[in-house]
Amino acid sequence: MEFGIVQFTSDRGLPPHVLAPLIEQAGFASYYVPEHGHIPTRRDAAHPGTGTSELPDDRYMRTLDPWTTLAAAAAVTERIRLATAVALPVQSDPITLAKTIATLDHISGGRVTLGVGFGWNLDELADHNVPPKRRRTMLREYLEAMRALWTQEEAEFDGEFVKFGPSWAWPKSTQAHIPVLVGAAGNEKNFKWIARSADGWITTPGETDIEGSVDLLKQIWSDAGRDGDPQIVVLDFKPVPEKLEKWRDLGVTTVLYGLPDDSVERASGYLAKLAGKLGLAPVSA
């Protein structure tokens, strides 16, 4: 089981080229960032945390672009995985996005993990012409089309939302398979989608029954005929040894922690303290 850091990026927090090396040097294995291109000022969709249209944090409207962020992090690190928690692919052109992610995987030496979401903010999705009741199908097509562009000499795709004829597109992804994880509630519907179209699950902040949800995911994964085990990334708030050991035995792949990012001093101090609690060895710069 590995440990990573998720930064709720904003134009007021530490930039990635400053924070990412601190994360790597402290001994953490991964760096996750979110995506929100814009937030409509009037919304009917309820935030899953507040239950209303009210946002719990103004960083939702100040979030940095994830791909630029991770490219900056790639340039100043060598080891940590570069990931999203979560990106919203259906808000981009799939051909252009496939190129961006393949380029990031190329320049980072194959360190990309793609965490995706279905999108809770239906008003945000509407501005990208995403039909809310078809967003799961749309995401599946985007992922399948991008995988074709990442791996095939001449890629083509003919779907409901993505269509292109035989095409050349380089670079191909450095990894033979870019891992795709889905950030969503731990329920049967979402786990069936994951078992069909992804490589694992990222928990939501409100998840209360990690053990039960992981057991359900593994059962659905096995019933779908998938080999091995799904990757499981858990968002945690406080490292408790007994809890972490239970998750390790359960097969959790990665545990993520947020951090204060308003200054180098606070971030460095927090990372050092957290790494010590987790038994991580610092890495020489």
Image (tube, rainbow, N blue to C red):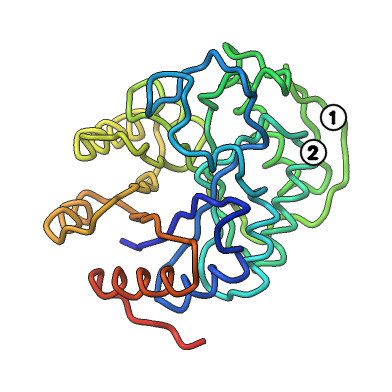
Instruction: Tell which of 140 and 57 is nearer to you.
Output: 57
With respect to residue 14, does 180 lie above or below? Answer: above
Residue 191 horizontal/vertical position (percent): 38, 29
For residue 241, what is the image quadrant? bottom left
The disc, 2 or 1, on the residue closer to the chain's N-terminal end is 2
Q: For the residue marked with disc 2, what is the amino acid?
A: Ile
Picture disc at residue 74: none
| Circles 2 and 1: CB atoms closer than 8 Å | yes
Q: Is residue 95 above or below residue 55?
A: below
Query: Is 218 or 283 nearer to us in this picture?
Result: 283
Q: Residue furthest left?
A: 242
The circle drawn on residue 164 is 1
Q: How many residues crowd around disc 1 within 10 Å: few (fewer than 14), some, or many (20 or more)?
A: few
- Residue 1 in the image: state x and y as whole percent: 31, 61
Return the residue at label 2: 95
Against 160, is 256 above or below? below
The residue positioned 50% from the left and 45% from the top of the image is 85
**What residue lies at 64% left-to-right and 24% top-to-bottom?**
40
Q: Amino acid at mark 1?
A: Phe
Q: Is residue 92 left or right of residue 34?
A: right
**Could you tell me which residue is drawn at 33 percent across and 25 percent down?**
187
